[in-house]
Amino acid sequence: MSSDSGGACPMPGIPPAGRCPAGGCCPGIKRLVGSATTTADRQNACKCLKTVAGAVKGINPGYAAALPSLCGVKIPYKISTSTNCNSVK
């Protein structure tokens, strides 16, 4: 997986809970998740999303965790600053 995550890392502004994700956010997450085909890729994708979650000031943690569902993507971990990405398989 390349370091170019297709726009998910960093994502454009994240809106408050209850609003649709910013325009480039879902396509970026979908590309990031779709390109993560190995355990190492999935761990790196997790680390990218975790970094973004920690870097966005005023982020709503519940909204960040809900982004995959809002974007129609399933990932086996929660987008959170407390996620242990090394445990992602």
Image (cartoon, rainbow, N blue to C red):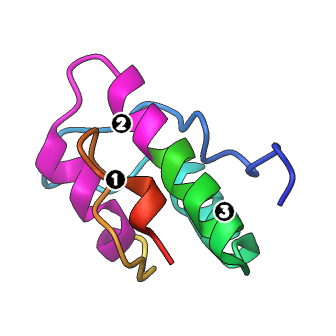
Q: Residues within 10 Å of mark 3 (few under 14, many from 20)?
A: many
Closest to the observer, 59 or 81: 81
Q: Residue at x 36, y 36 (%)?
A: 53
Residue behind mark 2: 53
Residue 15 place in picture, x, y as percent: 28, 38
Q: Residue at x 42, y 71 (%)?
A: 71
In the image, is 20 to the left or to the right of 17? right
The mark nearer the N terminus, 1 or 2, is 2
Q: Give, as a three-letter code, the residue at label 2.
A: Ala
Q: What whole-number distance in Å separates the C-alpha atoms at marks 3 and 2?
A: 15 Å
Q: Position of residue 55 (x, y in %)?
A: 40, 22
- Which of the two residues, 81 or 86, is positioned nearer the viewer here? 86
Magenta span main SS: helix
Say which of marks 1 and 3 sits in front: 1
Q: Amino acid at mark 3?
A: Leu
Residue drawn at x 28%, y 38% as measured from the top left: 81
Residue under the point 40% across and 66% down: 87
Residues rendered magenta in the picture: 50-70
- Given this view, does label 1 or label 2 mark the residue nearer the observer? 1
The answer to if 54 sits in the magenta stretch is: yes
Question: What number is the disc on residue 84?
Answer: 1
**Distance (Cα) linking label 1 and label 2:** 13 Å
| Dots 1, 3 in contact, CB < 8 A | no
At mark 3, the secondary structure is helix
Mark 2 nearby-residue class (10 Å; few <14, some 14–19, many ≥20): many
Q: Residues within 10 Å of mark 1 (few under 14, many from 20)?
A: some
Give me the disc on residue 25.
none
Q: Is residue 23 visible?
A: no
Left or right of residue 64: residue 46: right
Q: Earlier in the sequence, mark 1 or mark 3?
A: 3
The first of marks 3 and 2 along the sequence is: 3
Residue pointed to by mark 3:
32
